[in-house]
Image (spheres, rainbow, N blue to C red):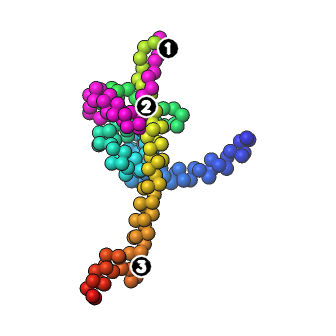
Amino acid sequence: MTMEAEQPAEDEAAPASKATKKASAEKWGHAVMDLGFCVVPSLLLRAQRRLNLNPTQLAVLLQLCDFWWDKERKPFPSKETLSQRLSLSERQVQRYIAELEKEGLVQRIERRASNGGKLSNTYDLTGLVKKLQTLEPDFREAEETARAARKAVAKRGFKSAKTSATSKEAAA
């Protein structure tokens, strides 16, 4: 592919990215946003209960997501880094990650240095991605049902099924 063919695609993507950056900077402040940000699907937060995540497990997952920048490059923060960020002991972090692994959301992959020494684990979040993709249709349906209900309420002369039933009973 030539450089000319690639250029228009970059120009088209740039305005959306700039608009998002500007809106985030206006909301959070430039100094805060300059320290970085993490893209996490809202479904992860909305589906916390369905994923059977307690608040600390969710916090651990969010920390792992903060280290996951590229799809092909799995995050590999140390337990020490995670424990400092979460105000937990390294052993607690290890336990929470083991729980996430048991739920099928995370897979620990051991890393070794060229001399055979241990490095921090790599964390594969493919299980989390797949579970969110499985839950998405349920949440989309619920969202569309709620949107339709809000739209119906906004129309003149709307009577809910409950109101209609109560009116019919009163008339009888």
**In the rendered image of this protein, does residue 137 appear above or below residue 114?**
below
Q: Three-letter amino acid code at disc 2? A: Gln
Q: Look at the numbered disc 2 and give the secondary structure of its residue.
A: strand
Q: From the image, which quarter does the C terminus lie in?
A: bottom left
Q: Residue at x 56, y 53 (%)?
A: 15
**Residue 157 disc label:** none
x, y percent for residue 40: 43, 45
**Residue 117 shown left or right of residue 3 in the figure:** left
> Where is residue 128, by image quadrant?
top left
Bounds of the magenta segment: 86-115
Residue 114, which numbered label?
Answer: 1
Q: Nearer the viewer, residue 109 or 26?
A: 109
Q: Amino acid at mark 1?
A: Ser
Left or right: residue 73 compared with residue 117: right
Which residue is the site of mark 3?
Answer: 155
Where is residue 78 shown, x and y percent of the image?
38, 26
Q: Earlier in the sequence, mark 3 or mark 2?
A: 2
